[in-house]
Image (spheres, helix red, strand yellow):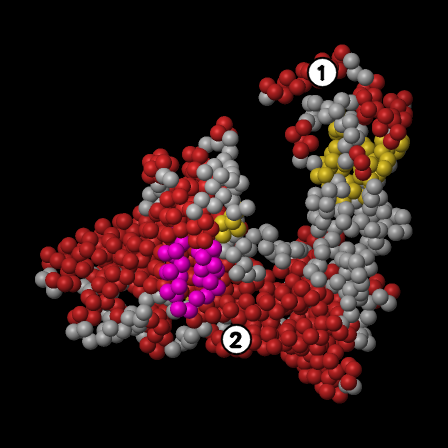
Amino acid sequence: MSNTAVLDTTSDSTKDIDVTDGKAKLMKWLNMNFRVEITDGRVLIGVFLCTDRDANVILGACSEYLKNSDGETEEPRVLGLVMVPGRHIVSIQIDDTTPPQKYFYDE
Amino acid sequence: MSDNADLYDGDGIMDSLPISSEVTYNWVDITGDFFKHIQDLQLGELLHDGHLFGLFEAMSAIEMMDPKMDAGMLCNRGNSKPLNFQQAVKAGTLKIDNIEPNELIGIIDATTACIVSWLEGHSLAQTVFTNLYLHQPHSIVNRTLKAYCIAVYKLLDCIRDCINKAQVFEEEDFQPMGYGYRLGSNPQMGVTNCDPSQEVNEQKCIAMLREQEEELNKKARSAGDESTDCWTGLAARIRLTRMLYQALLLITRRDSQAGADCVALLNGCSEMMKVVLKTAPLGTQPHENSDTPNPMGFEPQINQRLLPPTFPRYTKIKPRTEALQYVDELVARLRHAWKITSAPNFHTALDFFMDFSRQRACILSRSALQLLYLSPSPATTASMAQSAMNCPVGTPRPHHVFVEILRESVRDFVNPPALSAKSPMPTTPQSAMNCPVGTPRPHHVFVEILRESVRDFVNPPALSAKSPMPTTPQAREFVENFLARCVRPFAVLLQVCGHNRARQRDKLALLLDEFAALQEERDKLALLLDEFAALQEEAESVDAVVSGAAGTAPRACFGTWLLYHVLRIMVAYLLSGLELELYSVHEYHYIYWYLYEFLFGWLVSALGRATSLAAEGASRTDGKKGGCRKKRRGRPGARELLMCQIMQNMCGGYYKALVAFKLQGKIKTPLSQFDNEAVRYKHRFSPLAVLTPPQVHYHEYCEMTQPMQYENPVILYMGGCKHFLQARSLLETITVPDQEVQDLLKVCKTNFVVLKLLAGGHKRESTTPPEFDFSVHRHFPIIKLV
């Protein structure tokens, strides 16, 4: 327990002192839905939990979508927690939920 | 199975699930930004929400594109939507009539490959039920294929029944789930539309197959040169299916009169397999790199919806030739398993079980063996014995009708002097006639088997007919109670032998606990028997020989019998660690030391004591008759005694060699700060701690092996050499060497030479560790110098 506490405090302190611009952006994306396409054509949709310098991405509650020959997507396969190695990532999209939320608040 | 109703329509139409809560995403591409931003992270730095997600959670993630973890990556070519039976028929991709014989052979062989894949532990839904014909067998117009498909249902049901009864499978061996396919009586899938008119019972199914057999044979005779082989091959497949089904039914259901039939059926299966293997190339073959085992009739994805979401998307079906080979071997294994029905006594049977397990038989033949020996199965016997023991004290145990039958049948087999005709126990010779050779023993009889086993092994006066002991009702009751207590542990022992090799070790460790409880019981029994013997001596003036024997022997008799089995389990437990490669080389020395100094030594003395006790018992009974007949056969124990001595010597050889290696620094040991030999020693032998003989503790080990540390390695090598030489000469006294003996002989010869070289100073300075090669024998490696 004490270890994690120490870890937390250090990460908090680093955040306060110098969070570089890129890191701050990445931080903002945490816990948002990611749509990651990987090299073999599969699409993974899950919650962005973690990454590192090699772009290895960990997605939580992840589902795998396959495209069949007609281009239509099949039923997803639930995978749970997955790690996608950076070298296999083709594209990353984020579920931008800001506009509908704004709309909701405006009303 | 009703839970599948909402997942799968009865008529098999696969619509996509109604997309209930449609989520709309607003995807914005961030690929470029993302890859730019991560440059700001340090090497090895994780960016994460420290409160909710940490390194620990990250460790449990599945790695995508890793062939071992990512089940979906292997087969992600875009497939079109799988067609079900009706759709495929409509689309013309599935013929239900006018099927060519070569197509039929292709379909049947592919189905066989699916069944084999199922027996190797895959799910039914991804193997056999990818065959569309099996989804609606009654809609098939071709009568041969229809009969075959219905028979497959029955066959699957029978196999599952057999395996379930034996209870020797683990999740890695076999998946009994049926996924809503109704196996057995009504081969119709789905729950909603079972039509009672389509019920097919065993007889009808067999009759349908027979009819097809005849028809196909007729076609083979009338057909031209080219297609004759095809028709013959097809007839052989139908015949094989029928005979295998009938044989498995006999094994699983057990009609007592059917012994000879079953052998004939299995022999017939082997004959048919020859034709099947020869005609296999005639059938349609799967396309190269295709997931379907046959071009027509199979749809690997059809049941995807029935499986849990994380299940692998495909199962690799076993290649056809390998699958047919498997069936051929399976039949041979079943024929071998059948031999258990003529095992004369418990010891022979136990040896057979262990030997069978050693050959790493498949799940079906392992299960069949269980059922063939005890009916319904050792597993059931064990649980019934358990519930009988849990009955409140004073409740009379149900009388076992078959007890006398077995007593009689055992007498026919071994004719031990103790079971002479003048036995005071009631015998019913006519009932023995109902129990021919080859009949699986009903479970009630297991007590009798054990009784025979004790009697045969040590011949205690308490079980002997002539001694005054059994006439004392109390003494007899104690003996009966003890034997009843034995039923569960010994039945479980047989069951454990049926499990796969890797699982046996843990189960043996658990079993040792049960035997420990049994040993306590045995101690009580010994005390009581002693008391009775003493009382008897006072009350009656019995013949001095008899009273003397009765006074001393009972404690020893049951004790020796039990000790022998406990020691065998201990040995099996320690040796299994070698077979499963659980020990590292620097641990070998105390494993072999324990086997050499204690377990095999104790076994040798237990066997020796048993022989003398049995002889004593025999003279006790025979003596009174004026030594008229000495019918005892050459004891099979003699060979076992020899094998124990051989293995004891071999273990001694390894032990001495290993100590010498250690002294010469040839064995890598863990750095002392990470090492605690006492802890490892304790862990390795912990299951042995609960029993008598008591475990030899680490400090005792250290004391006993202390002098070895100052020994000259050369002398140790010479000592090891002598052990292997001794083992070798003992092995050479065996007149009919089996594979096991030949393997051991090879190991002994090689190790003898290697140790001789080492003793002569070969590679003395080298610190390269020697290699231990287990390829010849699973427990006793060949030592190799590199």
Element on which disc 2 rests: helix
Whether the magenta-drawn stretch holds residue B115 is answered as no
Residue B334 image point, x, y percent: 54, 68
Q: Mark 2 = which residue?
A: B263
The three-letter amino acid code for the residue at tag 2 is Val
Q: Chain of mark 1?
A: A
Residue lying at 78% horizontally and 82% vertically, measured from the top left: B226
Nearer to us in this view, B274 or B752:
B752
Tags 1 and 2 on a common chain = no
Residue lying at 59% horizontally and 67% vertically, measured from the top left: B329
Mostly what secondary structure, the magenta segment?
helix
What range is drawn magenta here?
A: B723-750
Question: How many numbered markers are drawn?
Answer: 2
Residue B350 image point, x, y percent: 42, 61
Element on which disc 1 rests: helix
Residue B231 image point, x, y percent: 73, 80
Nearer to us in this view, B279 or B532:
B279
Badge 2: few (under 14), some or many (20 or more) residues near its Cα, within 10 Å?
some
Which label sits on residue A12? Answer: 1
